[in-house]
Image (cartoon, rainbow, N blue to C red):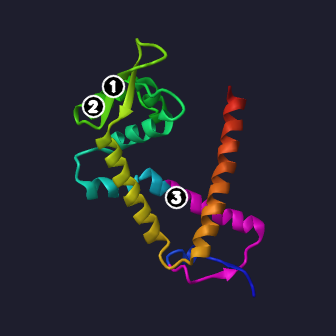
Amino acid sequence: MQNTVPSPADRDDPDQTMPAAAPDTALALVGQAMTRMRLLIGRRFIGRIALKRMETGLELSDIDAIGVIKRIGGHAEATVGAIAEQMRIDPSRGSRIVADLVRQGLLERAASQEDGRRSLVRITDTGRGVLDQIEAIKQETIREATDGWTEKEIETFARLYMRFTQGLEAQFDRFEQDEA
């Protein structure tokens, strides 16, 4: 049985296939898919869907800030400065976003155990509920995108996608070290 991969011309019809591509051609297809994925991510597709379904009045930057706190909170203290740095925004904008989320009850401020002069930011139970809703919508979106895939195809894709992402992260780390 001959292996097949979707043709870029047939991307809207996943059942259309072409003979297995040579490695360079297959890598070109990965590059094309990465470009399309980057455009979807840039358009904030899943975040926009989540905000529309949740009808909370939140903005994309709000869920970004909460997400950053969730990611860095497990291994470092989440400060407004750290949040702004991770979001690649000006610290004053980060401060306004955090202040708004504190007013809405999604975040709370606390004193640092390491340095009482520093103010930390933590997610409240209400904020965790928002994150849970967003995660559920993300999972639903992924389920819809993989509708018709076998369990084995989903498992294989998940394993390979994680491996690919780890490879890119390693390259990025090396790049940043070379830049320093």
| Residue under label 1 | 109
Tell me, yes or no, if residue 116 can be seen here.
yes
Q: The magenta stretch spans which residues?
A: 13-38
Distance, label 2 to label 3, CA atoms, is: 33 Å
Q: Which of the two labelled residues, at mark 3 and mark 1, occupies the earlier sequence position?
A: 3
The disc labelled 3 sits on which kind of residue? Met
Q: Nearer the viewer, residue 22 or 168?
A: 168
Q: Is residue 32 left or right of residue 100?
A: right
What is the C-alpha distance between the residues marked 2 and 1? 8 Å
Q: Which mark is residue 102?
A: 2
Asked which secondary structure carries label 1, the reply is: strand
**What residue is pinned by disc 3?**
37
Where residue 160 sits: x, y (%)?
A: 66, 62
The N terminus sits in image quarter: bottom right
Q: Which of the marked residues, 2 or 3, is nearer the chain's N terminus?
A: 3
Circles 2 and 1 in contact, beta carbons < 8 Å: yes
